[in-house]
Image: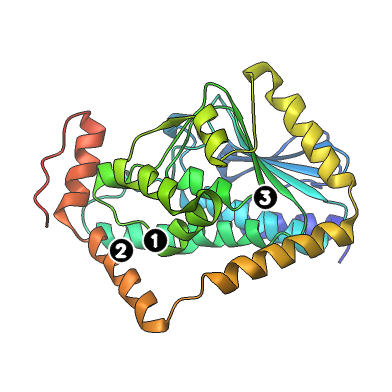
Amino acid sequence: MDRDSSEQTIGRMVGYPVGPVASAPSPIVLADGKLLVDRPADGVARLTISNPTKRNALDRQLLDAMNVVLEELSRLDSKTRCVIVTGANGTFSAGYEIGAIDEPGFHEEAERLVAHPFTSAIDALEAFPYPTLAAFPGHAIGGGLELSLACDMRVAIDAAKLGMPPAKLGLVYSHTGLRRFIDTIGAARTRELFLLGNYIDAHTALGWGLVNRVCATAELESMTLGLASELAQNAPLSQVGNKRVIAALLAERGALAEDLEHELIELRAASFTSRDLREGMSAFADKRAPRWRGE
């Protein structure tokens, strides 16, 4: 398949017409404008989350588009040697959008949103054979922060806040998501991040190893493009090989017995049907203290 037909495939799969990712002079607009794709440097593709009314929340439409674009870049566009994931309007992402789901069937819809397009987008990021880089122009919260952990490196502005709020919402996080944090920052920091549920600043995140670089807001694009260009120019066989070895070593160390994995999945599923989750989300939206019932 040639490049033009590959780009048409992206358009058909996400339901929106697009131009060639490799040569478009302006960003390709997907998912009703919530995902922008452009080429800011040779060998570099940039995916920009742009959902300003929801603080760049990740919804099904946006995640499906991201998943398809990443798979297409990985499979068909051999000139993409680095992918940047970033956010527009001074925010990376506030996480996946479950707050807008109506009460009837909430737990089934919430689980489906998290389990399918979110997991698929993360899997596509992790499976991209060349280096990936997340750039935080502002806060990275919840599922947005986990999405960034699927990238090989992360850069943040010094004013950015990072956090995981499940403890404030009554949610049990996925064991696969928690494993990403443990692999990145260790068990002690993961406990602090998830059990307290507080935000940390960019310099704390740098000390933890949650981000690789911190810079002033005005320097974010130049630092990001400088790193991305350097990553894109390195030996491709080395980049692909080293990513594969690192991923294999982490996966082997983290294998779970089938019955234990089932237990952890059930714990998470139970939290989606709990009254505490709905209370936590309502309290968060109302900016009040939640009234936990433990049920």
* Mark 2 to mark 3 CA distance (whole Å): 27 Å
- Residue 205 image position (x, y, % from top left): 52, 35
The residue labelled by disc 3 is: 152
The residue labelled by disc 2 is: 268
Secondary structure state at the residue bearing disc 2: helix
- Residue 59 image position (x, y, % from top left): 46, 48
The amino acid type of the residue labelled 1 equals Ser
> Mark 1 and mark 3 in contact (Cβ < 8 Å)?
no
Whichever of callouts 3 and 1 sits on the residue coming sooner in the sequence is 3
Toward which corner of the image does residue 165 lie, by quadrant? Answer: top left
> Mark 3 and mark 2 in contact (Cβ < 8 Å)?
no
The amino acid type of the residue labelled 2 equals Arg
Q: Pointer 2: residues within 10 angstroms few (<14), some, or many (20+)?
A: some
Q: Is residue 260 left or right of residue 13?
A: left
* Mark 3 to mark 1 CA distance (whole Å): 20 Å
Is residue 117 or residue 191 the one in the foreground? 191
* Mark 2 to mark 1 CA distance (whole Å): 6 Å
Is residue 70 or residue 206 the one in the foreground? 206
Visible residue check, residue 290: yes
Toward which corner of the image does residue 283 lie, by quadrant? Answer: top left
Q: Residue at x 64, y 68 (%)?
A: 249
> Mark 1 and mark 2 in contact (Cβ < 8 Å)?
yes
- Residue 230 image position (x, y, % from top left): 85, 40
Secondary structure state at the residue bearing disc 1: loop
Q: Is residue 15 left or right of residue 22?
A: left
Quarter of the image containing the C terminus? Answer: bottom left
The residue labelled by disc 1 is: 174
